[in-house]
Amino acid sequence: GAVVSQHPSWVICKSGTSVKIECRSLDFQATTMFWYRQFPKQSLMLMATSNEGSKATYEQGVEKDKFLINHASLTLSTLTVTSAHPEDSSFYICSAYLLGSLYEQYFGPGTRLTVT
Amino acid sequence: GDSVTQMEGPVTLSEEAFLTINCTYTATGYPSLFWYVQYPGEGLQLLLKATKADDKGSNKGFEATYRKETTSFHLEKGSVQVSDSAVYFCALSGTGTASKLTFGTGTRLQVTL
């Protein structure tokens, strides 16, 4: 089946620094990837939709200058949390939309970000 | 806007018990409905889906029927196992392809021996 990986699986950084999270579709091409944020014991909240070769579409309330998304190829999207603060600590999950599949998104295992 | 409401957990059941996790939705048009499962330490996996009214999705003994009249998509399993312990998310996708998913808050299921 379609596999999506994320790297790193967890990261600890100091306040004010930037962190990059990678999302890769390992065995298929993904023209569209989604980035979610999950708070403890809460649901996934869509942050942005990433389309290969174009600018990401951010959901209302998500700071695009803080959460930089780049989808440079059909198998890789990156999320960079810039000038991270403790309130950015969360679980970040990406998913990839399988080209030709009408409805199915494949999810990565997530990245735990802790900002100290 | 679209929304999904799930019963709050955690749900604790003994092995072989019957499981129901309620899910209702609000959406315009004719959404597709999904159940995702998240096992400890893993990413979300699609459990089952239904794309039109009266469709029944099923997988691994789990079932859910798309009920447009009650805007519901309740998840059921006749006999749960310890290995079913996980968090279950109900979700919907709006009309159209590659549409973004709207998730419910998730329901944690704990199955004990």
Image: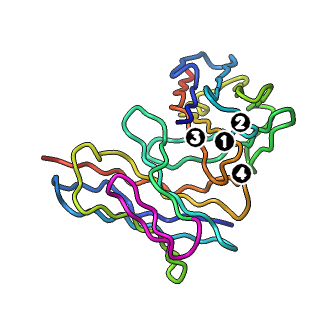
Same-subunit check for callouts 3 and 2: yes
Classed neighbour count for the residue bearing mark 3: other residues with Cα under 10 Å, few (<14), some (14–19), many (≥20): many
Q: Which mark is residue A30?
A: 2
Amino acid beneath label 2: Ala
Report the amino acid beneath label 1: Leu
Please say whether residue A92 is one of the residues in the magenta stretch.
Answer: no
**Label placed on residue A98:** 1
In the figure, residue A84 lies in which quadrant? top right
Q: Residue at x 64, y 71 (%)?
A: B27
Gap between marks 4 and 3 measured at Cα: 12 Å
The magenta segment is: B51-66
Query: Cα distance, mark 3 to mark 1?
Result: 7 Å
Residue shown at the point (29%, 45%) measured from the top left: B85
Classify A101 as above or below A14: below
Of residues B75 and A14, which is closer to you in this image?
A: B75
Q: CA distance from mark 1 to mark 2?
A: 6 Å
